[in-house]
Amino acid sequence: MSAQAQMRALLDQLMGTARDGDETRQRVKFTDDRVCKSHLLDCCPHDILAGTRMDLGECTKIHDLALRADYEIASKERDLFFELDAMDHLESFIAECDRRTELAKKRLAETQEEISAEVSAKAEKVHELNEDIGKLLAKAEQLGAEGNVDESQKILMEVEKVRAKKKEAEEEYRNSMPASSFQQQKLRVCEVCSAYLGLHDNDRRLADHFGGKLHLGFIQIREKLDQLRKTVAEKQEKRNQDRLRRREEREREERMGRRSRSRERRRRRSRSASRERRKSRSRSRERHRRHRSRSRSHSRGHRRGSRDRSSKHKSSRDRSSREKSRDRERKEKSSSERRHESTNGKSRSKRSEEREAGEI
């Protein structure tokens, strides 16, 4: 890659697709299904194992450093949960690698000479010490390349100790089997990258393997897978807790809503009952009022009738008294007339007598 291409890739990785206003690059978003989610999380096996013996070639999905920068910017604001897709991708890849490892172990078991369990355990111990030496040498070389010479020297001293243990283990393994069988190359399959390791490999070969890009790439993939599993588990737990909390809040709101609705129904029932009571009271008052009005009208009618009867009786008594007074008056008048007539008769008779006497 030229220096200009490296600078362009660096700018893409830092600023994303919108760094120079290129609209054609912005047409594909990092959320698109065509974009490799493992590449966005920097754990795609196609990138990690490129240039090794197990180079997988170009990924079928889109790889773009600018899209990775867009994802990193967006992931700071919200959780996109792309780790699940990346975890599924790495799990399928590691499962295939483990399947190849088991097949390689079966082939070795079929081709190599059968040995006893005790001899096999001693050979396994030699293999483990070889792995320890190779890992320590690879780490020492890495520290020396970084300039940390003191730490590198300490690791080399540990390598010498492990070499002494390996020598003793080889002696035990040599003494436990015939010389002809010992000279046969015993192979072992690396559990990390499924590569073959020899029992009699020298330190340089072991350091090249354990410090090589293939082995370190598989270590990186496996560590990234463990990290993704942990992250996904934490996010799922958090999501479940959030879901449970939302459910509890929703249930609490529903309970509050039911309580409020029940209170509202009780209020409506109480209001309707109070209205019914008021209506019943008003009806009872109205009935009482009508009853009182009827009773008053009846009592007034009764009093009126009694007054009428009393007035009739009184008028009849008045009429009878008036008739009696008239009769008395007539009687008195007739008696007075009779008296007057009698007196007049007497006077007339007296005057006539006097007149007769005078004539005489």
Image (cartoon, rainbow, N blue to C red):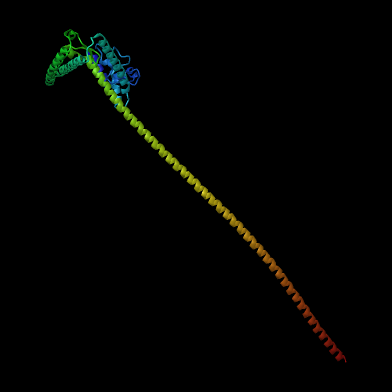
Name the spot of residue 252 as percent of width and height, x first: 39, 37
Give the left or right position of residue 223, taking residue 335 as reference. Answer: left
Q: Quadrant of residue 99?
A: top left
Q: Nearer the viewer, residue 83 or 108?
A: 108
**Quadrant of the snapshot with the C terminus:** bottom right
Q: How many marks?
A: 0
In the image, is residue 251 above or below residue 9?
A: below
**Quadrant of the snapshot with the N terminus:** top left
Name the spot of residue 185 as percent of width and height, x first: 20, 9
Identify the residue at horizontal 75%, vertical 74% (top origin).
Answer: 327
Q: Quadrant of residue 339?
A: bottom right
Task: Examine the rendering and report whether any part of residue 316 can be seen.
Answer: yes
In the image, is residue 260 above or below residue 60?
A: below
Name the spot of residue 44 as percent of width and height, x first: 28, 17
Q: Residue furthest right?
A: 360
Give the left or right position of residue 23, taking residue 328 as reference. Answer: left
Identify the residue at horizontal 32%, vertical 23% (top origin).
Answer: 84
Q: Nearer the viewer, residue 183 or 9?
A: 183
Q: Quadrant of residue 18?
A: top left
Q: Nearer the viewer, residue 359 or 73?
A: 73
Q: Residue furthest bottom?
A: 360
Q: Residue furthest top?
A: 180
Q: Nearer the viewer, residue 175 or 346?
A: 175
Name the spot of residue 176 as percent of width and height, x first: 17, 13
Task: Examine the rendering and report whether any part of residue 72 can be seen.
Answer: no
